Amino acid sequence: MTIDESEGRARCRSCRDEFVLEDMFLLCPCGSADVEVVSGRELLVTSVEVA
Ligand SMILES: [Zn+2]
């Protein structure tokens, strides 16, 4: 079993949907940018922004 770190996943705080990040865009298909990264390399970016 291999973890695919290249695939980032995020959860939308607006519609609560979980989706796969594509092209490093933190944008939910519903149009909301209020998303939380749950896995993937983008998680590092989010950590920096929070700090
Ligand atoms: Zn959404």
Image: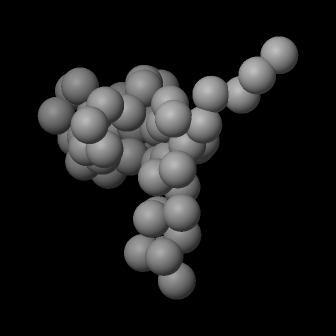
Residue 38 sits above or below residue 42 on the image:
above
Where residue 17 sits, quadrant-wise, is top left
Left or right, 29 with respect to 43, comes to: left
The residue sitting at the bottom extreme is 51
Left or right, 29 with respect to 49, comes to: left
The residue sitting at the right extreme is 1
Report the label total: 0
Q: In which quadrant of the rendered image does the N terminus lie?
A: top right
* Residue in the image at 37% along x and 33% along y: 21
The residue sitting at the left extreme is 31
Q: Could you say where residue 15 lies in the image, as x and y percent from the top left?
A: 36, 29
* Residue in the image at 31% along x and 44% along y: 24
Q: Could you say where residue 41 lies in the image, as x and y percent from the top left?
A: 52, 50
In this rendered view, identify the residue nearer to me: 35 or 46: 46
Left or right, 47 with respect to 29, comes to: right
* Residue in the image at 51% along x and 35% along y: 6
Q: Could you say where residue 45 lies in the image, as x and y percent from the top left?
A: 45, 65
* Residue in the image at 48% along x and 76% along y: 48
The residue sitting at the top extreme is 1
Check the image and tell me how it is coloured: one colour
Q: Could you say where residue 43 lies in the image, as x and y percent from the top left?
A: 54, 55
Residue 38 sits above or below residue 19 on the image:
below
In this rendered view, identify the residue nearer to me: 33 or 40: 40
